[in-house]
Amino acid sequence: MAQLLFFGRLADLVDPPSQAVQLPGDIQDTLALRAWLDTRHATGGALQEKTVRIAINSEIVVDPAPITNADEIAFMPPVGGG
Amino acid sequence: MIRLTDTPFDPGDELTRFTATAAGSGAIVSFTGLVRGQSKGGAVQSLFLQAYSPLTERGIAQAAEEARTRWALTGLSILHRTGKMAPEDAIVFVATAAPHRRSAFEAADFLMDYLKTQAVFWKKEVTEAGDQWIEPRPEDYTDAARWAGPQES
């Protein structure tokens, strides 16, 4: 199971903001994951915004990055400052 | 020392502790950020800060390392709150120690600019007008860009 995390305003859009999900076989990179989850959670494109970065196992990656069912995948909108 | 905490802290106690570890330094600069009581949405009822460990800590550690490379520091401390806070609560504490004041001032300023614009935190303000996720102000980015020029020693 992949562990999905949604931060900041995305945590208000995806319920629950931390979830374990079995990824379908055809979802093998971050771009496909963004599109699949955007539909699944009806987030209206929010997960596909360029300013929303993805971290895999707490390392920020550049689309399209390969993903597996063992990864922790975080969706991170622009940071809000301390 | 770099620490995230979801419990309140006393900046005075932190400075006392830091000063004790910085014996022999000629200068100590400290900065404390407080939760503001007013925002565009009116009176602030609470502030919620979310981090993503260990990514957040790792980014702060890299900024601290860069500060140590740029300035001759003899000590450095960064403490940041997460979770729910009330107006006037201390949200961030940065302290730097150096042989001379200029390095200490500039390193503390640099670290705060990193924390305001690049550190991995998400911030939600709860006001009378409702909840709002906050992003850095344009002047925060302008402040941070000052450090992109020639390195100082």
Image (cartoon, rainbow, N blue to C red):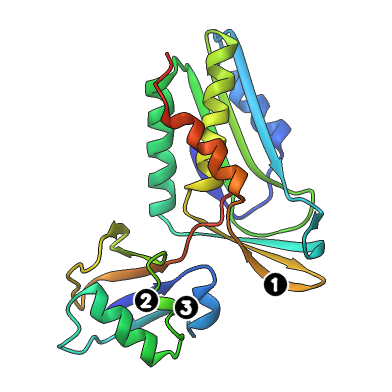
Q: CA distance from mark 2 to mark 3?
A: 16 Å
User: Is any atom of residue A1 visible in this view?
Assistant: no
The residue beneath circle 3 is A17
Cβ–Cβ below 8 Å for labels 1 and 2? no
Give the letter of the chain under mark 1.
Answer: B
**Which residue is at a point 37% across and 38% down the rendered structure image?**
B62
Position of B98 with respect to B34 (left or right) is: left
Residue B150's x, y, as percent? Answer: 39, 21
For the N terminus of chain A, which image quadrant?
A: bottom left
Q: What amino acid is labelled 1 in the image?
A: Asp
Query: On the same chain: label 3 and label 1?
Result: no
Query: On the same chain: label 2 and label 3?
Result: yes
Cβ–Cβ below 8 Å for labels 2 and 3? no
Mark in front: 2 vs 3:
2
**Which residue is at a point 76% across and 57% down the rendered structure image?**
B86
Give the letter of the chain under mark 2.
Answer: A
Q: What amino acid is labelled 3 in the image?
A: Pro
Q: Quadrant of residue A63?
A: bottom left
Which numbered circle lies on residue B131?
1
B121 w.r.t. B152: above or below? below
Residue A38's x, y, as percent? Answer: 38, 85
- The crowding category of the residue bearing disc 2, from other C-alpha atoms within 10 Å (few below 14, some 14 to 19, many at least 20), is many
The residue beneath circle 2 is A48
Residue B65's x, y, as percent? Answer: 38, 30
- Label 2 sits on a secondary structure element that is helix
Query: On the same chain: label 1 and label 2?
Result: no
Q: Quadrant of residue A19?
A: bottom left
Q: CA distance from mark 1 to mark 2?
A: 23 Å
